[in-house]
Amino acid sequence: MAAEIQHAPPDDSSIEQSTPSRDEKKADADDTIKPYAVDLEGEGSDAEKQRLVEKAEAVELTPVEAFKWNVEGDQSPFPEVAACVPNTDDPSIPCNTFRAWFLTTVFVIVFSGANQFFGLRYPSLSIGYVVAQLLVFPIGRAWERLPHWRLPLGKLSFDINPGPFNMKEHALIVICVNISSSIAYASGALVAIVSPVYWDHDNGAGFSFLFLLTTQMLGFGLAGMSRRWLVYPAALIWPDSLASTVLFRALHEPQEHFSANGWTLSRYRFFSYFTIFAFVIFWFPDYIWTSLSTFAFITWIVPHNQKVNTIFGMNSGLGLLPISFDWTQITYAGTPLTTPFYITCNAFAVVVLFYLFLSPILYYNNVWYSAYLPLLSSSTFDNTGSSYNISRVVDANLNFVLSKYEEYSPMYISMSYSISYALSFAAVTAIVFHTYLYNGKEIWAKFKNSRAGGEDIHKRLMNVYEEVPDWWYGVLTLIVLGLGILTVRYWESGLPVWGFIVVCFGMGVVLIVPEGILEGTTNQRIFLNIITELIAGYAWPGKPIANMMVKCYGYNSVKHGMDFAKDLKLGQYMLQKIPPRVLFVGQIYSSILATATQTGVLRWMIGNIPNLCSSKNTQRFTCNGAKVVYNASLIWGTIGPQRMFQAGQVYNGIMYFFLIGPVVTVIVYYLYRRYPNTWVRYINVPIFFNAAGNIPPANTTQYSLWFIFGFLFNYLIRQRAFAWWKRYNYLLQAAMDTGTAIATVVIFFALSYHNVTLKWWGNTVGSNTDDANSVPYLTVAKGGYFGKGPGQF
C-alpha cells in the first residue's frame, strides 16, 4: 500500500512546490506523531516500514491535500475508506430482484407513515434508517427459505426467491428507506398552511402531495448532474456513509478474528456487544435518571445564583463543565467518531471564541439589551423580557398592522441567537469564496473531463455498470421544476413563479457543488434555513406563506440534493456495488411512494383526530414542529427582517458578517499559500463560521462533548492504536447509534406513549434552577420596558 500512495503532480507549479508529497508526510509524521503500539509480526525492515506507513496514515488529510493524491492504486489512499470499504465487487450478484423491491415498498410505507404519524406528536418519534438496516437483514435471510417459485411472465418473468439474501439487495432497500422515510422537512410548513389552528389555508390533497414531493426532489437532478464533483472524486469520502458501510460488512461478511492492538473480536460481535451496551445505558439518562443527560451538578448546589447557572447550566447557560452520560447529547452537535478531528477543532474553536469567551462579555455588558433575556434561547421576546406576542401586531386575518407594532414592541432575540445569525451570514458567503479559492481548479478540470484527477478503485469497479445519463437527471429536474411551478402558481401562495425559479431553484444551482464538496470532505453542511427566510422576508414582505415556501424549496434544493449524492456514494462504497440505474430508479420510486404515504397519513389525521395541532388535544398531537415553522413565518414573513436588521435597528451590526465571511476566507487562504505546511492548512473558514449553527437550541456543552470524544477517538486512538481505529472506530459509531435508536423506540412505545413517568430526586433535581427556568441577568420593573418605547421605533 505504501507504494500505491503517491503524490500526483498538480497543474500549478506553485502548488507543486508548496504541497508535500505523501512520502514527505511520512517523514514529517515520524517527527510529529508520538510512537504508538501496533500489532506487527516479526521485526526488521518490513515491520519498520509498516509502522511508518501506519503512522503516516494516522495523519488526517485536508480536502486540498486529498484532491492532489494519486488514486490509481488497487486500494483507496484514504485510510478511512480503506478501513471500511473493500476493493472488490461481483457484478453477477443480483440486486434488481422482486425481494428487494417488495421489501423496499413495505419498509418505505411503514417507516414514512409511522414517522409522519408520530412526528406530529409530543414528544415526537423518528424511526431512523439504521432500524430498517437491522430489521431487513433477518427478514431477507428468512426469505431464503421460501420455495424457489418463478412467476412466468415472458420477458418479465422473475423469481419469488432469487436465492441467498445479499448485500446489494440489503443496501438498495436501506438507501431507499433512508432517502425517503424520515418526516419531510416541508411537513411542518404544510401542516402550518393547512391546519385550522394556524393559517387554515387547506388546498386539498393534491397541493399537499405536490408540495411535499417537489420540496423533497428539487435537488435530486442537480445532485445527479453534479456527480463528477460530488460522487466520483475519491477525495469526497462522505464520512457519514462509512458507518453504514461497515455495519453492512459486519452483518454480511464472514467473521475474522485477527488482532488489532490486542482486540480479536470479530466486527459482528463488537457491533452486537456495543449495541447492547448502548441500549442498556440509554435507559438511565432517558428514563431512569434523567439528570444524567445534563449533569450540571453545580446548578443543583446553587440553584438560584444567576451567574453560576448561566456559566455552568446546560439549558439556558454555557455548560462550562461538559458532563453527560447521554449518547444523544454527545452526538447532538455532530458525530464525533466519523467527523475528521481537524473539523471538530474548527467547530470547537468558534464555540470557545464566540460563545464561551465573547458572549458572556457582551451579555453582562447588556449589548443589544441581551441581559434582560436568557443568554441562550431560541425564543423571541418583547421589550419587557416576555415572549413576543404575535397576536398583538396582526389583525383578525393575521395581516401585519404597523400601528399595532409601533404600540407594542420591537422583537428581541437572545445573545446566543444573535451570534448564531451573524455566524450563519458569514458562512453563506464564505463557502462560495472558499470553494473558488481552494477547489476552483479541480471543479474546472472536472467540468472539462469527469475523469480528471484520476479514478479510485471504487469508481473503476463501478465502470462495469451502465451509468445514468446526464439527460435523465436533466429531465427529472425539468419535471420537478414544472411541478413546483404548478404548485406555487395554481394554488395561492404569494410566491411568484420568477421567485421560485430564481431564488429557490437558483440557490440549489449556486450552492449544490460548494455544499457538496464541503460535506463530502468534512461531514458538515451550511445551514441555509435562516438565509432563505431572510431573503424571502426582504423580497416578499407581509407574505408568510411565501416565506415558508421559499424556506422549504431553497433549503431542500441543497439539503436533499446532498442526501441524494451521499446515497450515490454509499452505492459505490458497498462490498458489492449497486448498479447506478437501479439505484436511480429506487430513489425516485421510494420518494414518490413515501410522499404519497405521508400525504395520506396527514390527510387522515386531519379528518379523524379531533383538535389536531391544538393544545387541547388529549393524545398530545400538538404539532410542535408546525408551530415553530408557523412562528418563524410570522417573524420573517409578517413582521419582516427589515424591522430587525436594517439601519437603525438593534441587530443591524450583524449584517456586516456577510462581508466578514469572504474577507476572513481570503486572508486565511493567502496565509495558507504562504505557510502551506503549518497548522494553517487545517483552518476551514466555512466550517469555523457555520459549525456552531445549531446554537440554539443546541448548547455549548454538546459541542464540548463532541470535541472531547473526537479528540479521544480521532486523535489519540487514531495515532496510538491505529489498527484498532481502522477496524472498530466507525463500527462503534454505528453500534452506539443503533442501540440508542432501538432504546428510543422501546421507551417511547412502552412508557412515553402511555404517559408512564418515574418521579424521584434523580429526575427532578435540576427542574427548578435558574438555568432550567431561563432566568435573565436583569429584570424589567413592573410596567417598565427596556430599549425603545411605544412610538419610538
Image (tube, rainbow, N blue to C red):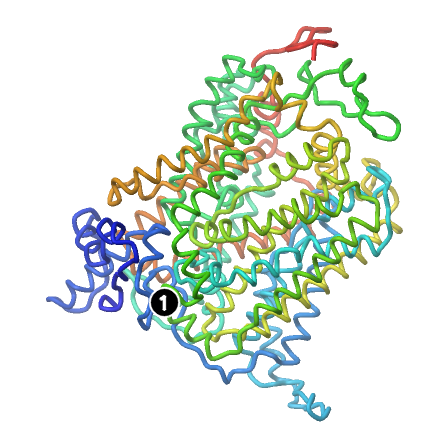
* x and y percentages locating residue 220 in the rendered image: 61, 60
Q: Residue 439 or 157: which is nearer the viewer? A: 439
**Residue at 41% over, 39% down:** 685
| Residue 569 percent across, percent down from the top left | 49, 64
The residue sitting at 46% across, 76% down in the picture is 463
Question: Which residue: 30% across, 64% down?
Answer: 70
> How dense is the environment of label 1, judged by Cα within 10 Å: few (below 14), some, or many (20 and up)?
some
Q: Quadrant of the N terminus?
A: bottom left
Locate residue 660 relative to residue 31 in the image: left or right: right
Is residue 711 found left or right of 548 in the rendered image? left
Element at label 1: loop
Instruction: Decide: is 101 above or below 647.
Output: below
**Viewer-closest of 507 and 567:** 507
Up/down of 378 relative to 733, above or below: above
Residue 595 percent coordinates (x, y) = 73, 59
Left or right of 68 in this view: 522: right
Q: Quadrant of residue 270?
A: bottom left
Q: Which residue is mark 1?
A: 454
Q: Mark 1: which amino acid?
A: Gly
Please name the residue shown 46% across and 36% down the image. 689
Q: Find residue 671 and report its image quarter.
A: top left
